[in-house]
Image: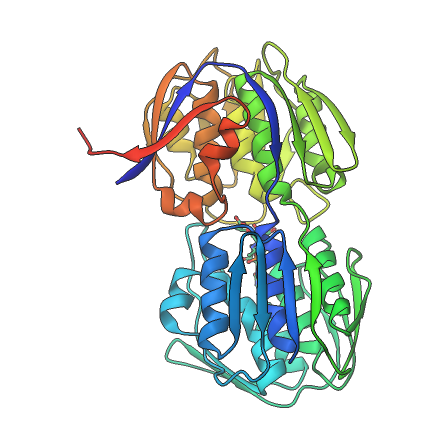
């Protein structure tokens, strides 16, 4: 099996460019289905989730080609409206195609996206919103069959779901009339999707605020777009420097997109300087514990950065309380951090991290994407060598984690490993 071998205990130094945002490029690729023209997407990271998404587009009858970090999609005449089960199983976030397929084809079929490593992942808000737009949705035998011409509607979300907001935006672009989304998610990735949809000739406004308005039914053409930097990947590099010590520059990301993360790192004693497209960080000798970290919808502290920040604070002076308010089961990295010498107690959605003087390298396994990244962060600050397995999770969100960490001077290699 492939593993990352990480030699810890050395301060980091260097500059790393942040990859394009995974959670922006996935809905944007789904959006290419809405237009009969050709779309060119730049800064498209090489992630397994992106490759699965390109494969779904091909199975729907689109042409989707990659050249370096540029992907070209032509959806002149899609022929299918069913998301293949094998790809749905590989990537539950394929549900984001539902609105786009329904909008373009007038019908859509997919198997119910199950839960994932983070716990149950319901889509009730997606389905009730699409029904409000006029879709007839039949839920039988674990499958969803949707059909209907869509018309604009005023939709209020019970909670600011990222995926539901995106699915409604995609469907509403092809619905006759005006759609409003109240209590919409406000993530930067939603703004990026709005900008791409408008580049196709759609008329979407309000993304980034809690109310988004879409004037649907306009003719769409091809478009060109550069995806924003990945704020969670950037948070990963910053947390790695905080954990291992040293200093670094992170480029290719808008510092405002992760200001809750940099605020925590500053409170923990890091020196952070932010400028357009660059974040510079210098770590202290030892981090200090911070006030409770509560994950929340944007612009709150991102749930996707919870594990990586916890990894950095394992060796801080003092105790830090985490409250994971978004997902039911997002502490699966805790047991592995404890195997490295961390002192963490979990009670329901609360985790208390008691700082210890140091962590020690160990053989650890990633149970989910950001938990895997957290173990790499912890390994960089630990004494000795760590063997990290479970790389299929990590590859979903990081194009080349070892290369990016080596750009910061880390000793990380990927190799075949036979369990001793
Ligand atoms: C997106 O997931 C991201 N994924 C997640 O990133 C991220 O953690 C999450 O947003 C929150 O920021 C992508 O963008 C591909 P939600 P999504 O709908 O859309 C509940 C990563 O590591 N909910 O905002 O699925 C849900 O159970 C991934 O990159 C309902 O109850 O998140 C959760 O508790 C992990 N009913 C909360 O809302 C619904 O119909 C937030 O979910 C939909 C969601």
Location of the N terminus (image quadrant)? top left
> Which is more toward the observer, 223 or 387?
223
Q: Is residue 216 left or right of residue 334?
A: right
> Which is more toward the observer, 78 or 166?
78
> Which is more toward the observer, 32 or 233?
32
Which residue is painted at 76% across and 40% down in the image? 256
Q: Residue furthest bottom?
A: 149
Ligand 1, seen in the image, is in the quarter at bottom right
Which residue is painted at 51% across and 62% down in the image? 93
Q: Residue furthest front?
A: 67
Q: Quadrant of residue 194?
A: bottom right
Does residue 147 appear anywhere in the picture? yes
Q: Is residue 324 left or right of residue 38?
A: left
Location of the C terminus (image quadrant)? top left
Image coordinates of residue 35 in percent, x first then y, are: 66, 77
**As drawn, 311 above or below 172:** above
**As drawn, 240 above or below 189:** above
Q: Is residue 86 left or right of residue 200?
A: left
* Total marks placed: 0
Image coordinates of residue 406 in percent, x first then y, are: 49, 27
Colouring scheme applied when the structure was drawn:
rainbow
Q: Quadrant of residue 253?
A: top right
**As drawn, 223 above or below 68:** below
**As drawn, 236 above or below 222:** above
Image coordinates of residue 185 in percent, x first then y, are: 70, 58
Image coordinates of residue 71 in percent, x first then y, are: 57, 61
Does residue 122 appear anywhere in the picture? no
Which residue is painted at 45% across and 33% down in the image? 402
Which residue is painted at 53% across and 15% down in the image? 11
């Amino acid at each position: 099996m492939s593993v990352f071998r990480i030699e810890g205990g050395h301060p980091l130094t260097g500059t790393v460019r942040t990859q394009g945002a995974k959670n922006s490029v996935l809905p944007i690729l789904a959006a290419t289905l809405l237009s009969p023209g050709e779309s060119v997407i730049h800064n498209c990271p090489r992630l397994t989730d992106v490759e699965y998404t390109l494969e779904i587009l091909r199975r729907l009858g689109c042409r989707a080609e990659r050249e370096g970090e540029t992907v070209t999609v032509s959806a002149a005449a899609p022929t299918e409206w069913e998301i293949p089960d094998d790809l749905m199983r590989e990537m539950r976030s394929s549900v984001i195609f539902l609105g786009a397929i329904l909008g373009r084809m007038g019908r859509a079929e997919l198997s119910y996206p199950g839960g994932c490593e983070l716990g149950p992942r319901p889509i009730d808000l997606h389905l009730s919103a699409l029904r409000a737009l006029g879709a007839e949705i039949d839920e039988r035998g674990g499958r969803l069959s949707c059909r209907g011409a869509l018309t604009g509607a005023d939709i209020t979300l019970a909670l600011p779901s990222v995926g539901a907001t995106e699915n409604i935006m995609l469907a509403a672009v092809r619905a006759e009339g005006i759609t409003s989304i109240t209590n919409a998610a406000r993530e930067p990735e939603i703004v990026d999707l709005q900008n791409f949809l408008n580049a196709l000739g759609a008329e979407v406004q309000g993304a980034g605020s809690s109310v988004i308005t879409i004037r649907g039914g306009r003719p769409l053409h091809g478009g060109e777009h550069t995806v924003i930097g990945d704020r969670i990947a950037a948070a990963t590099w910053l947390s790695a420097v905080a954990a291992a010590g040293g200093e670094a520059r992170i480029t290719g990301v808008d510092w405002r997109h992760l200001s809750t993360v940099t605020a925590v790192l500053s409170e923990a004693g890091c020196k952070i300087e932010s400028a357009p497209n660059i974040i510079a960080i210098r770590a202290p000798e030892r981090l200090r514990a911070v006030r409770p970290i509560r994950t929340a919808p944007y612009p709150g502290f991102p749930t996707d950065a919870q594990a990586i920040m916890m990894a950095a604070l394992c060796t801080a002076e003092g105790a830090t309380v985490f409250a994971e308010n978004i997902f039911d089961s997002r502490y699966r990295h805790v047991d592995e951090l404890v195997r490295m010498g961390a002192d963490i107690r979990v009670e329901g959605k609360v985790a208390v991290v008691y700082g210890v003087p140091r962590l020690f390298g160990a053989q650890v396994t990633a149970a989910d994407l950001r938990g895997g990244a957290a173990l790499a962060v912890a390994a960089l600050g630990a004494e000795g060598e760590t063997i990290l397995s479970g790389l299929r999770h990590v590859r979903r969100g990081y194009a080349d984690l070892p290369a990016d960490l080596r750009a910061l001077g880390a000793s990380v290699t990927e190799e075949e490993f036979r369990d001793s």
